[in-house]
Image (spheres, rainbow, N blue to C red):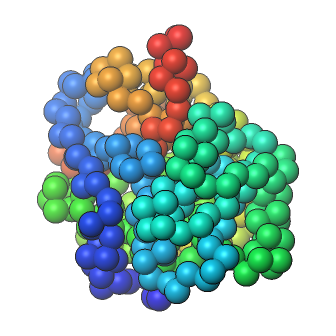
Amino acid sequence: MLVTAAAIEAAYDRITPHIRVTPALQLRSGDLNLPSGVSLKLESLQHSGSFKARGAFNMLLSKDIPAAGVAAASGGNHGAAVAYAARSLGIQARIFVPELATPFKTAKIRSYGAELEIGGETYAEARDACGAYQAQTGAMDIHAYAAAETIVGQGTLALEWESQTRGLDTLLIAVGGGGLISGIATWFAGKTRIIGVETEGCQTMKCALEAGQPVDVPVSGIAVDSLGARRASDLTYAISARCVERIVTVSDEEVMAAQQRLWQGLQLVAEPGGAAAFAALLCGAYVPQRGERTGILLCGGNMDPAGLTAH
């Protein structure tokens, strides 16, 4: 499958019976003390709690599934999405997560009926454990961001968002391994400026773009379970290098402030990775020009709300 706008349209038709059309909330200048109005796409309300359900359903509906079912390595959100989609379609799934995966996310994966295994300390080690299982059993790999089917599925978010909010000049999108921003950038190529947002501890795509190729990077910090891919894939790097204007970074403290603003002002739960793009606007890592129409994606909400009310 090629990553194209036409493929994204076909994927949206394919997965529409299985996903939610998530709201795009229009905030005016002054709301939440924002300097300008924004379109806030609430993908945190998607099935399984993140945009990942789109890519998972597109992959499962695009492939012949072996008798051994499917397997995936995940920091949490991708695993929950694969587990949810697999249960919906009657497919066996085994999910490998690293020790850093939060109890909230591992509980969600189990609640969808998937078998769950702790596959080492880091996401990279979970990937290795998942690969060994696939080689042994013949289960199909559902990669979190490297497969074209996954990227195209995530791109359906952009198609949907554009139908809800026309004429956006700039989108702020959180980046982990790059599957999400690659799909969105493919849809909006030539029409809308795409700005990636990473935390200071997870600069995977920023380092790749600076190096001119994917490179291994150390990952750490508050959003490591969702944005902590150690290396961008060749495909997500190539699309980002062509279609993403630049990457900006935010600190863990700025992400936590964004989470609090969303909770206190809108009663929206955003996990750290899900709030990163909003943090970039709040802290000034990205400053819109006068009259610029900006969209911000809240891409995930998989966390215990007690972590917000405790502050």
**Residue at the image point whose x is 66% and y is 49% from the top:** 75
**Residue at the image point whose x is 35% and y is 17% from the top:** 264
Q: Is residue 32 above or below residue 63?
A: above
Q: Quadrant of residue 260?
A: top left
Image location (x, y in percent) of residue 133 = 80, 70
Kindly tell me whether residue 289 is visible in this rendering.
no
Residue nearer the viewer, 104 or 148 = 104
Q: Quadrant of residue 159?
A: bottom left
- Locate residue 124 relative to residue 77 in the image: left or right: right
**Residue at the image point whose x is 58% and y is 25% from the top:** 253
Q: Is residue 116 above or below residue 213?
A: above
Image location (x, y in percent) of residue 277 = 44, 43
Q: Is residue 142 above or below residue 168?
A: below
Image location (x, y in percent) of residue 36 = 23, 35
**Residue at the image point whose x is 48% and y is 56% from the top:** 84
- Locate residue 223 relative to residue 53 in the image: left or right: right
Residue nearer the viewer, 199 or 299 = 299
